[in-house]
Image (spheres, rainbow, N blue to C red):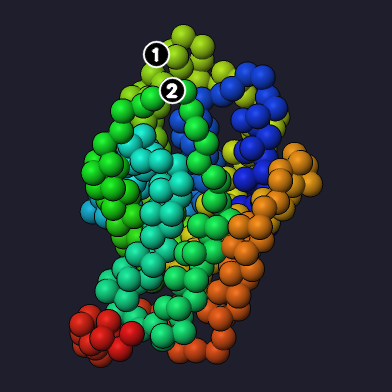
Amino acid sequence: MTLVAATYTVALRYTRTVDTELYFSTTAVCITEVIKLFLSVGILAKETGSLTRLITSLKENVFGSPTELLKLSVPSLVYALQNNMAFVALSNLDAAVYQVTYQLKIPCTALCTVLMLNRTLSKLQWFSVFMLCGGVTLVQWKPAQATKVQVEQNPWLGFGAIAVAVLCSGFAGVYFEKVVKSSDTSLWVRNIQLYLSGIVVTLFGVYMSDGAQVHEKGFFYGYTYYVWFVIFLASVGGLYTSVVVKYTDNIMKGFSAAAAIVLSTVASYILFGLQITLTFSVGAFLVCISIYLYGLPRQDTTKIQPSETKSSKERLATV
C-alpha cells in the first residue's frame, strides 16, 4: 500500500505540473470510484466462483438491501463533508497553521478507534501516534511566504472547519472499519456498496464544482495517458486501503500513509529536484521511529472487542 500511495503522489504531481492541459480533478475522482466499483465486482466474481453466484450475491447484498446501501453511504457523505471543510479551513488559515492542525486527524482516528471499536491502546502506542503526528507535520512543513495579495481570512471559521474535517476523517474511517468487521459479509460486497454511494456523491461534486466547464469542454477534458495512470493507481490504492482496514486497522493505515508521504517526497527530490530540508529529515526520522514503536509486540488491536469488557472512560483513563 505504501509503495502504491507514494507512486500515486509522484504521478499526480507530474500531471499537475508538467501536463499543459489541466484536467478536472472532480471528474478524475468520480472515474476512480467507477473503476474501484468494477474492480470490486471482478474480485467478487472470482470469490464467488460463478456468474450465477455473483448475480445472486449482488441481488441479496446490494440491490436487495437498501438499508445496507444506506449504511455505507454514511462514510461517503462524511468524506465529502471532510473535503469541503478542509477547503474552507485552507481558505481561512495560513498554510503552515493548516498543515499542523490537520495532522490532528491521526490522534483523532486513534481516539475514534478506542471509543467506537472498544479497543485499548498502550501508552507506547499513544506516544507513537502523537510522534507520527509531529513527524508528518515536519515532513510537510513549508515556511510561510509573504505575498502581495491580501486575502481576508476568518481564523475562527478556519479552526472550526478544521475541527469538523478532523472529526470527519477519524469517524468515517473507523465507521467503515466497524461495518466491515462487524459481519461476515464479503469485503468486496461492502466495497461495492461503498463505491455505489461514492459515485453518486462525486457526480454531485462534479456538478457543483465544475459543472459549467465540464459541459463546455467535456468530461474527459485534459486527460492523458499519465492522468489515466494516476486514476488507476488511485483505484488500486483504494482497494488496498480497504484490505488494510479489514485485516489491520485505521491507525495502521495512517502509519502507511505517513510512510508514503516520506517516500513520495524522496522520489520528488530525485525526479523533480525538490529541496530536502532539515525539517523534512527530522520529520522522516520521527515517522520511521513511530512506525517501529507502534509495531512492537503488543495486544492484538485488529479485532473489535466486546463492549462490556471496559467502558470508554476506563479505557481512556488507562492512557
Residue type highlighted by circle 1: Ala
Q: Quadrant of the N terminus?
A: bottom right
Q: Secondary structure at mark 1?
A: helix
Residue, x 63% and y 46% (percent of image)? 8
Residue 97's x, y, as percent? 41, 48
1 vs 2, front mark: 2
**Of pointers 1 and 2, the one earlier in the residue sequence:** 2
Residue type highlighted by circle 2: Val
Q: Name the residue at the right extreme.
A: 270
Specify few, some or many for label 1: CA neighbours under 10 Å numbering under 14, 14-19, or 20 or more.
Answer: few
Residue 196, disc: none
Examine the rendered structure and indicate whether residue 316 appears above or below residue 18. Answer: below
Residue 263's x, y, as percent? 68, 56
Marks 1/2: CA distance? Answer: 27 Å
Question: Residue at label 1?
Answer: 212
Residue 139's x, y, as percent? 58, 56
